[in-house]
Image (cartoon, rainbow, N blue to C red):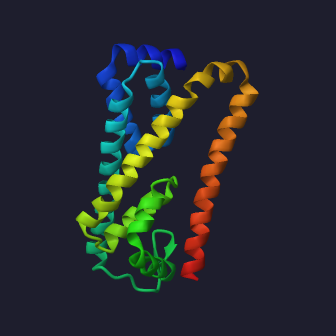
Amino acid sequence: MQSFLINFSETHRILAYLIIFIGVLIEGEIILILAGVLSRNGYLDFFNVIIFAFVAAVIHDLIYWSIGKKISARFGGSLTPQGKFLFFKLDKISRFLKLLRKGNGLYIFISKFAWNFNRIILVASGYLKIPFKKLLQYSIPASLIWAITFVSLGNIFADKTEILHKDIKTAAIFIFIFILIIIIFEGVLKRLFRREIM
């Protein structure tokens, strides 16, 4: 896999940046860590990777915010407490939206670092008709910090990849700890929201 990525990034640099761009729209963190490893070894430019990731992250936020605005237009901007939307109970969504309305900017910023929780916050922000400028006010710095953080992680740990190839157990532990930290962070955020909603 590593040799494929290296050969691909050497021969198709523009396409590699396009893959990073699309990868950030779909998933993000793993793509950026891999791009950071490739940039450390000189196959991609570190700053170009950050620029592509940053722009894609802001576009990602705008897409999900727009989805929320369309849902708001469809429901007339208000959810009735009875019934369900998709598989969510509307009374809980209403309480969540009231909470989000109070501190929406902070939630937009913090959610960037919690995997799929970010998308929920962005859709809810669009639903609440949070202004475009306010979304950008929090999305731009969060996206920049997020891109720099994950590309830098890959860049910093690029030297360790040779060690990790030789020691599969160490690689598995490293990946497990990284995923566990993100899951714990996301769980703490969800618990905070639940406590506020209840």
Position above or below: 55 against 63: above
Viewer-nearest residue: 196 or 92 = 196
Looking at the rendered structure, the number of numbered marks drawn on it comes to: 0
Viewer-nearest residue: 143 or 118 = 143
* Residue 91 x/y as whole percent: 49, 83
Q: Quadrant of residue 109?
A: bottom left
The residue depicted at 35 percent of the width and 53 percent of the height is: 141
Position above or below: 96 against 81: above
The residue depicted at 43 percent of the width and 67 percent of the height is: 106
The residue depicted at 48 percent of the width and 40 percent of the height is: 150
* Residue 148 x/y as whole percent: 43, 41
Q: Quadrant of residue 131?
A: bottom left
* Residue 61 x/y as whole percent: 34, 55
Left or right placement of residue 133 versus residue 117 in this view: left
Left or right placement of residue 54 versus residue 170 in this view: left
Q: Can the viewer see residue 83 in this picture?
A: yes
